[in-house]
Structure formats: structure tokens, C-alpha cells
């Protein structure tokens, strides 16, 4: 929506004059007029997320859980198994989007979900650069998107809206061991070689600190008795995308 300006039509050349001193093509807004403010989000960079995300994937794959936490050629995925999910999708190093939904706490409805649930739509792309929309289809694994954040190489940003989008409750910080290794401990604790004991805190931290450069000895120390080869391969896939 444009701001309130008085515009005078000047001739038939299709030029309009703003009382604030700007010339624009008639019927077209300037970049400044189109721009909506984006909200800067205080959240770790993709580089800071990688170590814990890769460690989580390594443990999951080692125990045979291969769908919920993984890296592909252009995406990092975390799904909590209960319908809440978040994915990073990579266009290039400084153009990364983070999309997802917490189905219990997301109060934003975007595109098809607004129509499906009969809710007012929240425009998650308002004011965003065009590249944010390069790959925002939640299918085939999920139905709806409730948040879209963009990483420009320096900061995470989102559109300006008042509704709770669920991102803070989706659990990515815990999954990436940003606030401790509790989730990783839980995932690993029933590995057969641990004999009912939790893995060593030092071994867990070493797995996270490897920053996806996961080796068989590092993973074996955390989940002895599971498929170490599969886990190492899953963790190291997080190295494929330059960040």
C-alpha cells in the first residue's frame, strides 16, 4: 500500500509527480514506496547452527531414523516427529531462507492455509526481496508454512506482523544444541553399547564441536552399537552447502 501522496498527472507520457518531490512512472510505485520494513531476528547464523544440526542428524541416522533430521543438496531439515518442522533452503551463500511451522503455536496463515482454515492471511513475504520466494513449497512432506525468514549473509529478517508465527516454539535451538545437549542426550541414551547409561557429556560436546566434520570415533563414543557409518555420512552431508 502506498503512503498518502498527492499525485498530478503530467501530460500523456505516463509520468506522475509526488508532492514530496519524486518522479515515478504512472501506475507504478517507486522502490521506496513499495518497501515495507523488515524485522531483524536475533538468531544464530547458519554457520552457528550447523554443528548441532549435523550431530543431531548423525545420531538419528545411526539409530535408523532417517526422515526427520537430514541434509540434502539444497536443504537442512528438522522435524520433531509431531508435525512441527523447520527447514533451511539455500539459494546461495548469502541467500538462505528458513521456513516451517509449529502446528500448536503458529497463528499465522499464509496462502493456501488461510483459505483452508478460513483465516485472514498473514503476508510472510511483505517487504521481502524477490529471492525469498525461490523455494517456499512445503510439499511433499508438510502442508503449511507459518514463517519465512531470510538470511542475507549478515542477519535473519522476517516480514513485519503481530501474530505469533510459532518459530520460537518449534524447537530448533534445542535440536541444534544451542542451549545445551539435552535433546542429543535423549536421542543417544538408548544406544546398546551404553548399557543404559547416558553418553559422556564430553563425547556429546565433541560431536557438536566437530561442526559436521564427524568421524567414526567421534560418533562411536556417543552411540556405540548403532550404525556408525550411516550416521557419519548423514552428519557430513551438512558440509556440502557453503555457508
Image: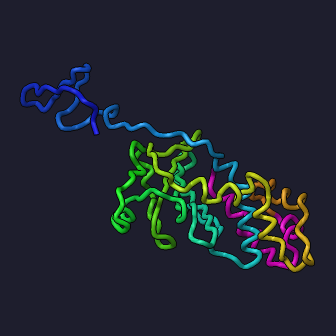
Identify the colour scheme used: rainbow
Which residue does the image show at 89% across and 59% down from the upper left? 201
Give above or below for 133 relative to 232.
above
Which quadrant does the N terminus fall into?
top left
Q: Residue 27 occupies which quadrant of the picture?
A: top left
Residue span colored magenta? 215-243
Q: Residue 11 occupies which quadrant of the picture?
A: top left
Q: Estimate the x, y position of residue 36 in percent, counting from the top left.
A: 39, 38
Which residue does the image show at 50% across and 52% down from the upper left? 164
Viewer-proximal residue, 202 or 170?
Answer: 170
Counting labels gives 0
- Left or right: 186 with respect to 195? left
Which residue does the image show at 49% across and 55% down from the upper left? 147
The stretch drawn in magenta includes residue 186: no
Q: Estimate the x, y position of residue 57 in percent, counting from the top left.
A: 71, 67
Q: Residue 23 occupies which quadrant of the picture?
A: top left
**Farthest-out residue, left:** 12
Q: Estimate the x, y position of residue 22 in percent, counting from the top left.
A: 25, 23
Q: Estimate the x, y position of residue 218 in percent, counting from the top left.
A: 86, 64
- Left or right: 91 with respect to 194? left
Which residue does the image show at 22% across and 37% down from the upper left? 28
- Left or right: 16 with respect to 146? left
Give above or below for 73 relative to 132.
below
Viewer-proximal residue, 154 or 188?
Answer: 188
- Left or right: 91 with respect to 191? left
Amino acid at each position: 500500500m502506498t503512503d498518502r501522496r498527492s499525485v498530478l498527472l503530467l501530460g500523456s507520457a505516463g509520468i506522475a509527480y509526488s508532492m514530496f518531490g519524486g518522479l515515478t512512472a504512472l501506475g507504478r510505485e517507486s522502490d521506496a514506496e513499495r518497501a515495507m520494513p523488515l524485522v531483524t531476528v536475533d538468531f544464530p547464523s547458519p554457520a552457528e547452527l550447523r554443528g548441532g544440526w549435523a550431530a543431531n542428524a548423525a545420531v538419528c541416522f545411526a539409530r535408523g531414523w532417517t526422515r526427520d533430521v537430514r541434509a540434502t543438496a539444497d536443504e537442512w531439515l528438522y522435524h520433531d516427529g509431531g508435525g512441527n518442522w523447520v527447514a533451511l533452503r539455500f539459494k546461495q551463500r548469502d541467500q538462505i531462507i528458513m521456513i516451517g511451522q509449529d502446528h500448536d503455536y503458529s497463528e499465522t496463515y499464509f496462502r493456501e492455509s488461510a483459505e483452508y482454515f478460513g483465516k485472514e492471511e498473514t503476508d510472510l513475504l511483505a517487504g521481502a526481496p524477490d529471492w525469498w520466494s525461490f523455494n517456499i513449497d512445503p510439499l511433499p512432506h508438510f502442508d503449511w508454512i507459518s514463517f519465512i525468514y531470510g538470511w542475507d549473509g549478515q542477519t535473519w529478517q522476517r516480514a513485519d506482523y503481530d501474530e505469533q508465527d510459532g518459530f520460537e516454539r518449534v524447537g530448533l535451538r534445542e535440536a541444534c544444541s544451542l542451549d545445551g545437549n539435552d535433546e542429543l542426550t535423549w536421542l543417544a541414551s538408548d544406544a546398546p553399547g551404553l548399557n543404559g547409561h547416558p553418553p559422556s557429556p564430553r563425547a556429546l560436546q565433541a560431536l557438536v564441536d566437530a561442526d559436521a566434520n564427524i568421524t567414526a570415533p567421534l560418533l562411536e563414543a556417543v552411540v556405540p552399537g548403532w550404525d556408525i557409518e550411516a550416521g557419519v555420512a548423514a552428519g557430513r552431508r551438512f558440509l556440502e552447502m557453503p555457508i
